[in-house]
Image (cartoon, coloured by chain):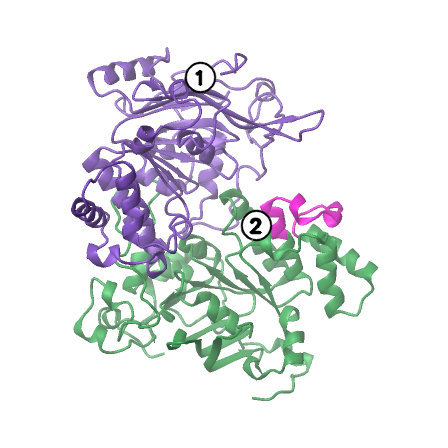
Amino acid sequence: MSSTPPPAASRARPGEPLLSVRDLCVEYVTPTGPVRAVDRVSFEIGRGQVFGLAGESGSGKSTAAMAAMRLLQPPAVITGGEVHYEGRDVLAMGEDELRAFRWKEIALVFQSAMNALNPVLTVGAQIADVIERHENVSSAQALERAAELLALVGIESSRLRSYPHQLSGGMRQRVVIAIALALNPPLLFMDEPTTALDVVVQKEILQQIAELKERLGFSILFITHDLSLMLEFCDTVGILYAGRLCEVAPAKELFANPQHPYTRGLMRSFPELHGPKQRIEGIPGSPPDMRSPPSGCRFHPRCSVAIPVCDQEQPQLITLAAPALARAVGAETDTPDAPVGQQRGHRVACHVAAQTAGSSDV
Amino acid sequence: MSSDEPTSTVQDTAVSSSPAARGETARAVDGEPPILRVEGLTKYFQVGGGLRPKQLRALNDVSFTLRRGEVISLVGESGSGKSTVLKMLSRLEQPTSGRILFKGRDLLAEEPRSASLSYRGQVQMIFQDPFGSLNPVHTVAYHLERPLVRHRKATTPEELRRKVLELLHTVGLNPPEEFAAKHPHQMSGGQRQRVAIARALAVDPDVILADEPISMLDVSIRMGVLNLMDELKRSRGIGYLYVTHDIASARYIGDRTIVMYAGHMVEGGSSEELLDSPAHPYTKLLLEAVPDPRGNIFRELPAKSGAPQLVDPPPGCPFAPRCPEVMDVCRRESPRPVQLRRRDPGAPERFVRCHLYEEDQAPPVGEALGEA
């Protein structure tokens, strides 16, 4: 809990996750009492890794990520847990420290590119603004750098003088990504970055992000409700339900071997593009009202395999035995040496899965 | 309508001279006549104004036939004209040219200015946004009573009440008494969309126009809404036009799927055959771009993104500037629809508008997701 930032030399401490979130709790203060939107959520993001938080609306995925960046506004309050970034205690940072921390260390890409840009400023001015604000450079230098950034995301530098309305949705989203990359941050936080875009544009932008990630080596905290997209894009995925993490696993392993009944339900909620047409049911019921969440496992009212203990006791996230299946399926994954923090294998919070799959020592 | 309308390249309709369409005519005679037929529907918008006004071609020569108890999925990206089709059919927009035949009646001739109450009682619409399509100050019961009263489906208060509860029960909002008293903000998105469906059902329609009805819903409840639509199709014989950008859900609910690009119908056929063996390069591109959990993010797309030129478009195929298989003819001539051979002769006809194909050619097999 030291308030002095460590020297820059300590930045590349090997073996340590870039961002570590432990038992994070966030509550919204409402007239009828606090509503716990994020309940003891823990995850880690290693260097160069893409960690995804998936969940339905109201599951707390954005709230958890915003809390990790200290971007929450009242009535949302962080009520517990720890957030460490390169060993620095993010929750203990003062205002000045936070201002330097945001954008230089963690940058944001919001969902709607249409609203993220200022309509009365040129694209170049908006990129240069970020650079001038955080770095000691002249306007001319900042504009020059802005042109480079545009080129980086595949837009001609002549577009510096364009206004947002002159660009397509996909181009605007690329500009927002360029702004996020302006200070070369080690961690990018992307909240539904491609949701409003057509599939072809979406694929192109994600490919570009993936290429830039390989080149520049940043990490990504990726948020989306689209599970297919998430599994395709992320190294590791955490599934949130009603504010709690119910399953965390490497993406390919999660796809091949989902353990939590909710995750399984989600996997069955997507119709197939090929093969015989089968009726699929989705998941019966709807997500709980967070003002009065169900007791025990929050998924139990919608769960088809619930046992008596499920509405009594909250299941803990436990690590499952070595994912044998992952070896077979994961052959095509391109993460041979995931850093520490990603090697936690497959964790699930479910009484039934714990019984059937058999847990191992952590 | 205007006399200089483009010659209607009739496709997929009973009046076409193609062999496949003639087969359809025969079926239409001994079966039921189609509820809805669209012929050469075209919509141009004037843009720019001033001395040199330009034409934005939102919809070009769209023709199809919807039968009782059939779901046609219209798939395309933003700007493809899929929603414009619905706006014409719901009579919120006037087409520039073309005909809408509803149960054989020429609608634009009979009701040129706006739709009659009777038409609106038979063709209903479900909108994308269940948060915006219900009035926040009124209860669910109010939303359902309005159409029942307006269309004289209930005469006494008791009957009205009974019908409201029946509707809620039909769309799976139980107990109906409880839901009838709720306000929109007390319900989830999925429940609101069910109310919107109940409201459409109130007038006992023959056709429902559904504009991206599940795209704003959480994934776990999407299938419930689609399954409900499917059940209503089977039990009541309702025909749907289902507009979506999600090609997997188009296949799931659509008996037929029509792919739209730049206001043109570029390909159509039975949903399964279309997705298993897409013929048009654009359809192939769309399928490749769908997120695939098994896939590799770096897998290259066959073509780049890019918006088609809708204002004063150049001659030829609208996809030519992006097409990986473009030929000289593609930039000169607009391709005419050709009928492809079907895997199952009983399946709805397959057509494609692409110079790569000839009449009765078999579509390419399984090129979409190579390894599948």
Q: Is residue A176 above or below residue A341?
A: above
| Residue at 81% from the left image edge and 66% from the top image edge | A137
Q: Position of residue B221 (x, y in %)?
A: 31, 54
Mark nearer the viewer, 1 or 2: 2
Residue under disc 1 on the same chain as residue under disc 2: no
Q: Is residue B195 left or right of residue B339?
A: left
Indicate the secondary structure of the residue bearing disc 1: loop
Q: Residues within 10 Å of mark 2 (few under 14, many from 20)?
A: many
Q: Is residue A212 left or right of residue B345?
A: right
Q: Is residue A165 above or below residue A20?
A: above
- Name the residue type under label 1: Glu
Chain colored green: A
Q: Position of residue B240 (x, y in %)?
A: 32, 34
**Res B37 seen here:** yes
Residue A205: assigned label = 2
State yes or no: residue B361 in magenta: no
- Name the residue type under label 2: Ile
Q: Tell me which corner region of the image, top left, top right, bottom left or bottom right, holds residue A212.
A: bottom right
Q: Is residue B338 above or below residue A95?
A: above
CB atoms of marks 1 and 2 within 8 Å: no
**Res A267 seen here:** no
Q: Position of residue A82 (x, y in %)?
A: 49, 81
Chain colored purple: B
Residue A158: assigned label = none
Q: Which residue is mark 1?
A: B358
For the magenta stretch, what is the residue range?
A153-174
Q: Position of residue A154 (x, y in %)?
A: 66, 48
